[in-house]
Amino acid sequence: MYPNKREDGVLTIELPDRIDSVTAADVEVNIMGIVDGGEQDSLILDAVNLVYISSAGLRIVLKLLKKIKNVSVVNVDGDIYDIFSLAGFTNMMVVEKKN
């Protein structure tokens, strides 16, 4: 299970360091378990540790967007931001780079 917290209808989940074809199924089960375990209006995915995301990881984010209307990804490294941007996710949701 990934570190998470709920506060005032906002769920924050800290993503693992890699989401690829090997880890995606486990990541999805864990994240959906957290999301389905409570009520939230918004979801923040904290990518502070994320160093790699594949198309399998992007599919998880897309599923979350369909489930929860207000999803954002924060603390995104520059290369990961480029992946989100090239895939069009920055047009669908808030994606914030690390400071």
Image: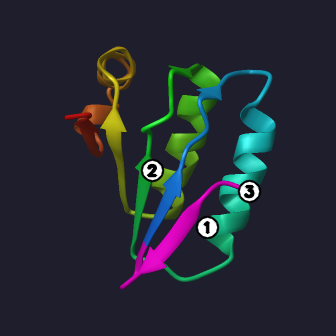
Instruction: Please tell me which of labels 2 and 1 falls first in the chain.
Output: 1
Side (left or right) of 99 relative to 43: left
Disc 2 residue type? Answer: Leu
Dot 3 lies on which element?
loop
Disc 3 residue type? Answer: Met
Residue 12: x and y in percent read 46, 62
Quadrant in the rendering for residue 18: top right
Q: Is residue 46 above or below residue 9?
A: above
Side (left or right) of 40 relative to 36: left
- The alpha-carbon separation of the residues under discs 2 and 3 comes to 14 Å
Asked if residue 53 lies in the magenta stretch, the reply is: no
Which residue in the rendered view is the most extreme toward the left?
99
Residue bearing the label numbered 1? 35
Disc 1 residue type? Answer: Val
What residue sits 19% from the left and 35% below the top? Answer: 99
Residue bearing the label numbered 2? 45
| Label placed on residue 66 | none
Give the tally of numbered discs. Answer: 3
| Label placed on residue 1 | 3
- The alpha-carbon separation of the residues under discs 3 and 1 comes to 12 Å
- The alpha-carbon separation of the residues under discs 2 and 1 comes to 11 Å
Indicate how the structure is coloured in the image: rainbow
Asked if residue 4 lies in the magenta stretch, the reply is: yes
Quadrant in the rendering for residue 9: bottom left
- Mark 1 crowd level (few <14, some 14–19, many ≥20, 10 Å Cα): some
Magenta stretch in the rendered image? 1-10
What residue sits 61% from the left and 81% below the top? Answer: 38
Q: Is residue 93 above or below residue 41?
A: above
